[in-house]
Image: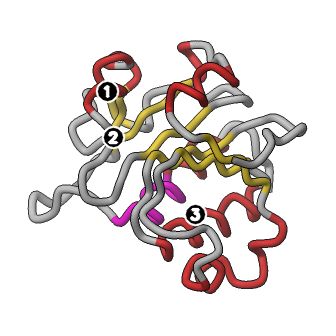
């Protein structure tokens, strides 16, 4: 696993991502917004997969990437406060518009096909959020789209253009 980034601040955390293109696109958003990208293993692809880098285009080299072997390793190494964790699931009880996100928030997303592991959700039930959908015809958005929308909302009070 890679060494934790020395620069801290807001971070996107992908737990067991499966689709390399989504991870690449999330990485590109992280570069654009100066966020750390944290990947929790196992991954559904090799990080060297050219599809990851293709989605991140030539920005991949600028990603502040940290990898952890497991969620438990992440929790042990970072020891996040409860108010730093924001987990996103389609069934989250609160809207992602509701909280005020601290500068050092962890924005946590699960696998594209199954979401976050049940044990993570159970341990952090009060930290579950969702993106509201105006249409009843879809349940959720693509992971990369969701992560980007969340990141911009989280930074809304901190970014002045």
Left-right relation of 15 to 54: left
Left-right relation of 120 to 23: left
Which one is closest to the eye, mark 2 or mark 3?
2
| Front-lying residue, 79 or 84 | 79
Q: Kindly identify which numbered label has been placed on residue 26.
A: 3
* CB within 8 Å, label 1 to label 2: yes
Asked if the magenta segment contains residue 125, the reply would be no
Instruction: Tell me the residue at 38%/47% (across/down).
Output: 110
Quarter in which the C terminus is drawn = bottom right
Image location of residue 26, percent across then percent down: 58, 63
Q: Give the residue pinned by disc 2.
A: 116
Q: Is residue 147 above or below residue 90?
A: below
- Tell me the magenta residue range: 142-149
Image location of residue 80, percent across then percent down: 63, 19
Q: Earlier in the sequence, mark 1 or mark 2?
A: 2
Instruction: Tell me the residue at 59%/71% (across/down).
Output: 24
* CB within 8 Å, label 2 to label 3: no
| Front-lying residue, 92 or 71 | 71
Q: Give the residue pinned by disc 1.
A: 121
Q: Earlier in the sequence, mark 2 or mark 3?
A: 3
Residue at the far right: name it. Answer: 6
Asked if the magenta segment contains residue 144, the reply would be yes
Q: Is residue 105 above or below residue 141?
A: above
- Neighbor class of circle 1 (other Cα within 10 Å; few <14, some 14-19, many 20+) is some
| Front-lying residue, 1 or 16 | 1
* CB within 8 Å, label 1 to label 3: no
**Alpha carbon distance from label 1 to label 2:** 7 Å
Instruction: Tell me the residue at 70%/38% (across/down).
Output: 10
- Neighbor class of circle 3 (other Cα within 10 Å; few <14, some 14-19, many 20+) is many
Q: Kindly identify which numbered label has been placed on residue 4.
A: none
Image location of residue 57, percent across then percent down: 69, 84
**Alpha carbon distance from label 1 to label 3:** 22 Å
């Amino acid at each position: 696993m890679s060494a934790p980034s020395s620069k801290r601040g807001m971070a996107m955390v992908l737990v067991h991502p499966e689709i390399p293109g989504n991870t690449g696109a999330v990485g590109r958003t992280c570069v654009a917004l100066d966020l750390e990208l944290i990947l929790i293993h196992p991954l559904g692809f090799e990080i060297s997969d050219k599809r990851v880098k293709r989605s991140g285009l030539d920005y991949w080299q600028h990603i502040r990437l940290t990898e952890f072997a497991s969620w438990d390793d992440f929790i042990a190494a970072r020891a996040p406060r409860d108010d730093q964790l924001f987990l996103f699931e389609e069934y989250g009880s609160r809207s992602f518009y509701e909280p005020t996100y601290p500068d050092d928030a962890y924005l946590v997303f699960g696998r594209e096909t199954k979401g976050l592991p049940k044990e993570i959700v159970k341990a952090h039930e009060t930290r579950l959020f969702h993106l509201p959908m105006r249409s009843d015809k879809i349940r959720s958005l693509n992971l990369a789209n969701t992560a980007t929308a969340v990141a911009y909302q989280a930074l809304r009070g901190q970014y002045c253009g």
